[in-house]
Image (cartoon, helix red, strand yellow):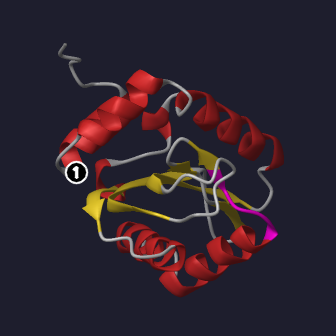
Amino acid sequence: MEVQSILSPRRVLCGAQGGSKKRALETLAHHIAADIPTLNADELFSSLIARERLGSTGIGKGIAIPHCRLANCSGTLGALITLQDPIDFDAIDGEPVDIIFALLVPDEANDEHLQTLAGLAEKFSNPGYLAELRRADNNQALFDAAVGTTTVTP
């Protein structure tokens, strides 16, 4: 899975204030809408919250991958935030979440949606990848770590 195909430097946010799951998703929705003017932050937030009501997207190890389908989404989009302080996200392992990768897909993108989610879950299962994301201390460093352009130092 090539993260750079769905993520842009404008859709990463390093060290965001979380507070709660709801607040983190609201921050994420507003951050995405600021980059994609055709998306409404309130509608996006509502879609992400509606998906969370079906079951938590906290996949464990401090990671959540909230996702939703949108009628006015022209292609698969991603956004990544790290939180200053981990938050309860009702993750499957009960651990707090500090890395959130949102995935937005067009309504009709069924297979692509599932394949992208599986690819992200696989990427986030790599401890080295997670360490690079958590080591990032600014938006550009977070983007570079996410797309794999950082230099790993021992």
Q: What residue is rendered at 73% in x and 76% in y?
A: 50
Q: Residue at x 75, y 74 (%)?
A: 53
Residue at left offset 64%, top offset 63%: 90
SS for callout 1: helix
Give the total number of marks visible in the rendering. 1
Give the image location of residue 94, x and y in percent.
62, 54
Q: Residue furthest front?
A: 94
| Circle 1 residue | 139
Q: Is residue 152 above or below residue 58?
A: above
The residue lying at 36 percent from left, 48 percent from top is 8
Residue 13 is inside the magenta segment: no
90 vs 141: above or below: below
Tell me: 80 left or right of 84. Answer: right
Q: Position of residue 12 (x, y in %)?
A: 33, 54
Q: Position of residue 91 (x, y in %)?
A: 64, 55
Q: Residue furthest top?
A: 154
Q: Is residue 145 left or right of residue 70?
A: left
Q: Main secondary structure of the magenta part?
A: loop
Q: Hey, what amino acid is under mark 1?
A: Asn
Image quadrant holding the C terminus, namely top left
Within-10-Å neighbours for mark 1: few <14, some 14–19, many 20+ = some
What segment carries the magenta color? 54-58
Which of 121/77 is in front? 121
Q: Tell me where residue 4 appears, x and y as whole percent.
A: 42, 36
